[in-house]
Image (spheres, rainbow, N blue to C red):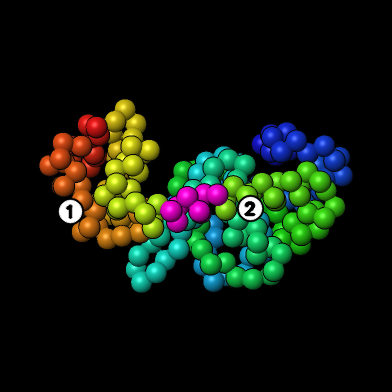
């Protein structure tokens, strides 16, 4: 799996390939495992090799989704902490069983200056995260929650069905279960969806 990571990043430097094999480790994690904790120093950069990780912030018993990490992605906030020796401002929990590449932060800093391919990975990660966060901000600022909820349901639907609880949807969209339940009922009355036992059918 490490070989696949090296191949996808097009790491041509043999010295970096050797350093990755010698100085990193690969671990597996089950759904629900907390792998990054808010207010703790980042000692290891975690890169998803397989599976999916949910990155979020907590605020007064509410969770605000920042983004999901997919294969060959890492948390930008953790990456920035590698250069500043600061604490994490987010939590990260395994959303689907994961395989994780772990790299001590001292190497992350050094590799960014030593290897062109690693520097390219760092820049690409920051750039893509910036665009994602700007789009998310625009949605929060200009799109009504009801529309964001419906767009989110469409993006998560499989065969026009979403299997998520009202509480899970509230966490994803940074609001309360009561608000989500009210908006879902309104969407159902408008003929957009059907509310079923433990699932939502998109009609659109």
**Does residue 112 appear to the left or right of 202 in the view shown?**
right
| First in sequence: mark 1 vs mark 2 | 2
**Does residue 130 appear to the left or right of 181 in the view shown?**
right
Q: Residues within 10 Å of mark 1 (few under 14, many from 20)?
A: few
Range of the magenta residues? 131-138
Residue 137 rendering spot, x and y as whole percentages: 45, 56
Q: Determine if the magenta segment contains residue 112.
A: no
Residue 80 rendering spot, x and y as whole percentages: 65, 61
Q: Determine if the magenta segment contains residue 137.
A: yes
Most foreground residue, 119 or 75? 119
The residue located at (54%, 71%) in the rendering is 39
Q: Is residue 19 above or below residue 137?
A: above
For the C terminus, which image quadrant? Answer: top left
Q: Quadrant of residue 57?
A: bottom left
The residue located at (69%, 63%) in the rendering is 82
Give SS at disc 1.
Answer: helix
The answer to whether residue 154 of the structure is visible from this angle is: yes
Give SS at disc 2.
Answer: helix
Q: Is residue 86 above or below residue 145?
A: below
Most foreground residue, 182 or 94? 182
Residue named by callout 2: 126
Q: Is residue 181 above or below residue 202?
A: below
The answer to whether residue 29 of the structure is visible from this angle is: no
Residue 22 rendering spot, x and y as whole percentages: 80, 48
Residue named by callout 1: 182
Residue 146 rendering spot, x and y as whole percentages: 26, 49
Farthest right residue in view: 15
Q: Residues within 10 Å of mark 2 (few under 14, many from 20)?
A: some
The residue located at (31%, 27%) in the rendering is 159
């Amino acid at each position: 799996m490490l070989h696949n990571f090296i191949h996808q990043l097009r790491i041509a430097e043999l010295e970096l390939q050797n350093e990755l094999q010698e100085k990193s480790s690969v671990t597996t994690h089950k759904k629900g495992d907390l792998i990054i904790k808010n207010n703790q120093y980042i000692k290891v950069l975690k890169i998803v090799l397989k599976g999916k990780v949910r990155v979020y912030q907590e605020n007064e018993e509410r969770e605000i989704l920042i983004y999901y990490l997919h294969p060959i992605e890492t948390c930008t906030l953790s990456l920035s902490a590698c250069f500043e020796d600061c604490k994490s401002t987010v939590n990260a929990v395994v959303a689907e069983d994961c395989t994780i590449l772990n790299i001590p932060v001292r190497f992350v800093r050094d590799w960014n200056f030593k290897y062109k391919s690693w520097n390219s990975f760092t820049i690409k990660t920051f750039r893509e995260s910036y665009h994602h966060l700007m789009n998310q901000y625009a949605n929060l600022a200009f799109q009504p929650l009801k529309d964001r909820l419906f767009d989110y349901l469409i993006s998560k639907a499989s065969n026009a069905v979403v299997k998520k609880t009202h509480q899970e949807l509230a966490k994803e969209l940074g609001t309360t279960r009561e608000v989500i339940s009210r908006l879902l009922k309104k969407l159902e009355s408008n003929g957009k969806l059907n509310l079923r036992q433990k699932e939502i059918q998109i009609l659109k």
